[in-house]
Image (spheres, helix red, strand yellow):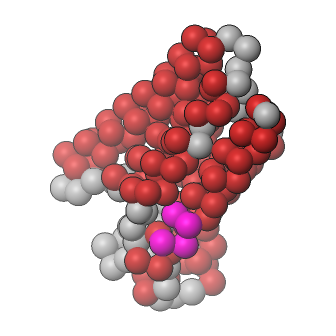
Amino acid sequence: METCLLAAGVVILVVSLGLASASDLSNRTIPNACAVSAALAAMPLAVSAPDLPAALGRSLSGTAVVVALLTAAASLSRRIHGRDGVGAGDIKLLGALGLWAGPVGGLAVVGGSCLLALAGRAAILRTRKCASRATHCRDGSMPMAPAIFAAALLTYAMGLWGW
């Protein structure tokens, strides 16, 4: 039974990340439903853990660390550039992944998604002179959900998640 619940949670997580990526690419928003479903899908993982208090602590601290870091980054960017450097949808989606990955894995997903997004942006700028009209907005922002999805898969495959 626990294996079935965990498998269902993973499927919901992957579908949520895929839908968030598609939405972010098409209209530059990450629906709240994607972040909420990704967060709720982590419940079977925590409940099935042998040490429930430790599992809940790891999940909640993962979310707290990720959300605190990204909120601070957005605030700092607002002070320096006059606009947030991190979208609220990105913060919510990464916070949900913090529930899955714990603090170390959550930070790895944040760092990995930033590196992947920068690499993608560099590749687009190298191959296209008008990249701001392709996948980037005129204000220089870019969709992060696909990079978040890829970073989540990579950090999980590398064994950096707290489970």
Q: Quadrant of the N terminus?
A: top right
Residue at the (47%, 31%) spot, across then down: 63
The main secondary structure of the magenta stretch is helix
Q: Where does the image place residue 153, in percent across and percent down from the top left? A: 72, 50
Residue farthest toward the front in the current orientation of the protein: 1
Q: Say whether residue 31 is left or right of residue 105.
A: left
Q: Where does the image place residue 141, in percent across and percent down from the top left? A: 38, 67
Please check the rendered image and state whether residue 20 is part of the magenta-colored stretch, yes or no.
yes
| Chain part drawn in magenta | 19-23
Q: Say whether residue 26 is left or right of residue 149.
A: left
The residue closer to the viewer here, 123 or 87, is 87
Q: Where does the image place residue 15, in percent across and percent down from the top left? A: 63, 60
Decide if residue 28 is in sight here: yes
Decide if residue 147 is in sight here: no
Q: How many marks?
A: 0
The residue closer to the viewer here, 43 or 122, is 43
Please check the rendered image and state whether residue 139 is part of the magenta-colored stretch, yes or no.
no
Query: Is residue 124 placed above or below 78 in the rendered structure?
Result: below
Q: Where does the image place residue 38, in percent across and percent down from the top left? A: 55, 48
Residue at the (58%, 54%) spot, across then down: 148
The residue closer to the viewer here, 77 or 67, is 67
Query: Is residue 45 placed above or below 156 in the rendered structure?
Result: above
